Structure formats: structure tokens, C-alpha cells
Amino acid sequence: MAETRQFKTESKRLLELMVHSIYTNREIFLRELISNASDAIDKYHVLSLTGDKLEKRSDYEILIDINKKKRTLSITDNGIGMTYDELNDNLGTIAASGSREFLNKISDEKLKTEAELIGQFGVGFYSAFMVSKKVVVDTKSPLSDKAYRFTSDGTESYTIEEITKEKVGTSITLHLRDSKDDDKYDEFIEEYTIRSLVKKYSDYIRYPIRMKTEQEVAKLDKEGKPIEGKYVKKSVIETLNSMIPLWRKTKGEVTDEALAEFYKSKFSDYEGPLKSFFINVEGLISYNSLLFIPNHPPYNLYDESYERGLKLYAKGVFIMDACKELVPSYLRFIKGLVDSPDLSLNISRELVQQNKQVTRIADALEKKILSELEKMKTNDYDKYLEFFKLYGINLKYGLYELFGIKKDSLKDLLVYTTINEEKPITLKKYVEGMKKDQKFIYFASAKTKDAIKAMPQMDRIKKEGYDVLVLSDDIDEFALSILDEYDGKKFKSINQGEFDELSKEEKQTFETLKEQKKPLLEKIKELLAGKVADVVISKRLSDSPVCLVSGEGVSFEMEKVLQQTNQDQKPKAERILEINAHHDLFKALERLYVKDPGKLAKYADLLYAQALLIEGFPLENPLEFSNAMIELMIESTPLDI
């Protein structure tokens, strides 16, 4: 005889909340019911190890059955089942967790770990009502002679009645809601949908999840041989889940081919990863992680639409697809997953409830990733250069972010093309190769080393044999400004500030020359007022006539980058015109200053325009410059040619 009971008033409200508010995605119900089934098997297994009351078994399984005619979906396990009292306590009282109570009764920590129970809040079962108009639970416990059926429509009440059931375990049958409008409940009685949901959420439940499926097989002749082109449908029992997560194995147990296939299928890539590494940690927070560096950046890696983060699992159960808290922004290219039994999850197991645990895992993962990159750099430099070509800009952003907090961790991972070396080199190698009396680590911004070699500011540096870092990314100068120095050597742009690599004798000669040419320099500065901050004799030019350099602070490259931003105030670099006092052009200016000072203004403008063009800046008035050049060519060309 069936016994009808009312849900408690507070339970009714909570049940309504469960169905309509707690879970944001109704497909979660299958994950919850499979997790409960897994817990039930775990409980049986642990109890069978602690005494002789239960038969020791190895035939554990979870069965899924679809009945399209009746519109039902059933999940059956051969776990511990429930007694009459447990039915009332676990299903009749919302938020009463049988799994939590079970764990509290186990004193052996090793057995607690063996159990690896997933349930925490006692609410997962009620997710079934999101898709069901009625739920029927048939259960038998090995600790009771009787079996029972729990039936409820998830509103006011539930019934419990005694039934005949031979096998130990629990079967939950969902009578699906009717599909209408946008609510398509029919999808949950489709093989493809169920298979996909199991693969997505429960692929690594450690017991086989099986389902009867229809498959096409070759039709056989009388002799049992397949008939070509003839097929028949046949019902087969198919195992839907992988069971043993790849990341819980040791690296030696997994082939490179298996890793590559796992990565491609899990992360929808057409080729294997550039690098993969396992992380297995046991301690205050235990977790397993499998991380990958893709062989190519995603097309939208730097777009706002790109969702960084690692897949998150708790005890093998899928929780979320991209937990961004697990990887810092500068490592956004890292793919992978984390599986931990120690995460505190919210009631719907959809979001992490306490960030302290995730933060600790994230800090450890970041250190591990950087350590692996350092190993790659040391042991396989060519492969590291391949990595840096793809993702080096991310490390530079990491250096610049948060005011350089990460600079000590990242500085030795940076590599740069230089004008003297065939391959990109580290900052350490640059410093080791510096000339005996060289004071600075020199750099210049350009897309190629040839472009830097052609710069007039390179005259003296080439003669001294100094190497120069080629900065080809917009972020480079900003990153080096944060780094400031490496191994006690300051960074210095070849076209910023003064060149300070002169000998004592050269400095004395320069000071004498500066005094001698002061009147002409001040006159040119006056003529270029508003355009340049100063006009000086150059210490760095030996072959070229003129160059433009910036003062300390904002460089020309920084100015160009900042001009592309949306900032209201865009700082400009201080412009300093440097002239080679030994060049014939300067000597011509000197003669002009003496004989025809009226023309000096025109020549000063041409000189400044030339310096602007060399630096890649646009001219303020190209037509004026063109007319001045034509006039100069006419003046300097004899009419009788």
C-alpha cells in the first residue's frame, strides 16, 4: 500500500527554487543523476571493504535507458540502494546529503579517499524535476529485505510504496515534460543528446556508463559472411564514457600520439599541441592538471570574444568549460584542464564558491608553466624560439602588466633578435657578449634588423661593434621601461637621450666643438622653435648628416603607439635635432650662416623635415617640403648644363 507524505513547507519552497532558479542550464540534470549513481556505487564498494556483510564485486555499472514511446529516461545503478528511512531522509528532505553523512561516518581517511564521493548538498536529485513532470525511484538496499518505490511530481507531496525488486541498487525514471514552444524536452530521449551529455559532463566517472543503442551492422549471408552494401540495424550495449581520465595517469603511461589525439578532440584543434605537461599535486589542495601549448594561436586570441581559462573538473565530473581564474591574462594561450577533489563548489556545482583554493592552484600552475618554459629554453632552444615566435608577445605583456610584479619571473624567458646574432638571444646572452667598456644594453624599434642598421643613430654603435636589440612589437619599449635593467646594465634606446660611450679625450673634444658651434646651433634652434626642444652637435653620428632623437621619458616609438589609443591626452616625445659637425652639410650651413643668413630658415626646415622622414614621422606640410626641395635643386644646378 502506498504511503503519501507532504514535503515540508520550507522544502516546497526550496524545491521550487531548485527547479526554477539554482541551475542555469537544465541539461545539468543528467550530470547530477549520474553523479548520484556513482556515489551509490562508491558507498557499496567502501562498505564491502569494511566488513563481511556485503558481497565484494567488480561488476559495477550505470545503465541509461531511453523509451521514446513512453517518453521516459531511466538511470540505473547497482550501488548501495536505499532503505525506507533513507528514502525519506534523502529524497523526502531537500538538502539532506546522504553522501556527506556517509563520509562523516568513515573514520579511515584512506577509505574516504577511496570513496571519492561527488555529492555534497543533497540537492542534485531534484534537478530531475527541471525536465520531468514525474519522477519514479525504485531502490533496494542490501541492508534491507524490502524494496521501495518513491514517486513525486515535484510539487506538494511524494509517495513511498513497497515493491518487488531482486537486484540491489537504484533506478530513477524520468517522465519527461511535454515539449511546447521553445521548451524542447524531446531532445533528452535522443541517443545523440544523451551520448553528448555523458561525454561532456560525466566522461571520467570511474564506472562504465552504458546505454542500449541502435547501430548499423553488415548483413550476413547464410554462411555468416557480410553481404557487401547490405546493412541492418542491431541493438548493442555501448559504453559511453572513457572512465579513466588521461590526466590521472603518469606521463610515462601516455604516448605522444594519445596526448595529441586527446588534445585535438578535447579542444577542437586540427593539429596536436606544441607542448604538453602533466601536473599532479597532493597536499593541502590536491589536484591533477594536463596543460597544452597549442601549435598555433587561436584566430581570436587577442579579441574580447576570446574566453581564456582551463576546463574545471571536480572528482572527474565536469564543472565549467573555461575557469579564467586558473590562468593569468598573459598566459591566455594555455589550454588544458584541472581536476581537484578539494574544490568548494556552490549548490549547483556550476561555479566555484571560494576563490582561495582556485587562487592557490592558479599560483602553482603559473609557476609550473614558467618552469616548463625555462626547461624548454634550456633543453630545446630551437623549439623555444618556435614557441616565442608564437606567444612571446604574451610574456612581454605579462612583464608590463601590474606594474612589473612578474618581471623577475619573466625576464629570463625573453628573447630578442639582434643586429649581430643569427638567432634571437636572451638578455643574459646579450650581457655576456657585451664589449668590455660598454655601459648599456642598446635597443631600437623596427620590424627588421636591416631597418635598424640603416638608421643614422647606428653610425657610432656600428663602429664600436655594439649589439642592438631589435624591438618589433608595440609593447616592447613599454616592457623594457618596466624592466629598467638586466644584471645591473640599464636599457638604452639608440635614438633617445645622449650617447654616453665616449672616451675622456673624446668628451673634451666634444665640449670644445660645442662651444665653437654654439651661435649657429642656437640660431637653428630659434628658427625651429615649437618644432624641436634643442639643436645639438651629435656624439653618435659619424657618417650621416643629421638625426632626430627624443629626450628622456616618452620615446618616439611610445608616442606612435599612444597616438593609436583612445586616451584624451596623448603625450609626445621631446624632439632633439642632432647634427654631425664633421659632415659637409654642416659645413655648408656654416658658410650660409656667414654669407647669406636669410636663407638659413629654409635650410633648417629642410634639415628638420629630413630628420622626420628618417624617423618615420609624417611631414606637417608635404607640399611645402616638395617646393623647397625643387627650389634648392634649381639653385644648386648651373643653368648652362
Image (spheres, helix red, strand yellow):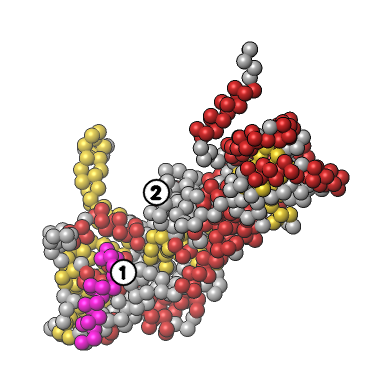
Residue 95 image offset from top left, x and y in percent: 30, 81
Residue 154 image offset from top left, x and y in percent: 18, 76
> Along the polypeptide, which appears first: circle 1 or circle 2?
1
Residue 581 image offset from top left, x and y in percent: 75, 37
From this view, report whether residue 139 is shown above or below residue 5.
Answer: above
| Count of number-bearing discs | 2
Left or right of 302, for residue 67: left
Numbered disc 1: secondary structure:
helix
Q: Is residue 14 magenta?
A: yes
Magenta residues (range): 9-28
Please state, as top left, top right, bottom left or bottom right, where the N terminus lies in the image. Answer: bottom left
Please state, as top left, top right, bottom left or bottom right, where the C terminus lies in the image. Answer: top right
Visible residue check, residue 627: yes
Front-most of residues 450 and 639: 639
Report the residue marked by disc 1. 32
Report the residue marked by disc 2. 268
The amino acid sitting under disc 2 is Ser
From this view, report whether residue 604 is shown above or below residue 354.
Answer: above
The amino acid sitting under disc 1 is Glu
Residue 468's image quarter? top right
Q: Image point 28% across, 67% down: which residue?
A: 24
Residue density around tag 1, few if under 14, some if 14–19, many if 20 or more, within 10 Å: many
Q: Which mark's residue is nearer the viewer, 1 or 2?
A: 2
From this view, report whether residue 226 is shown above or below residue 488.
Answer: above
Q: Image point 50% across, 69% down: which residue?
A: 359
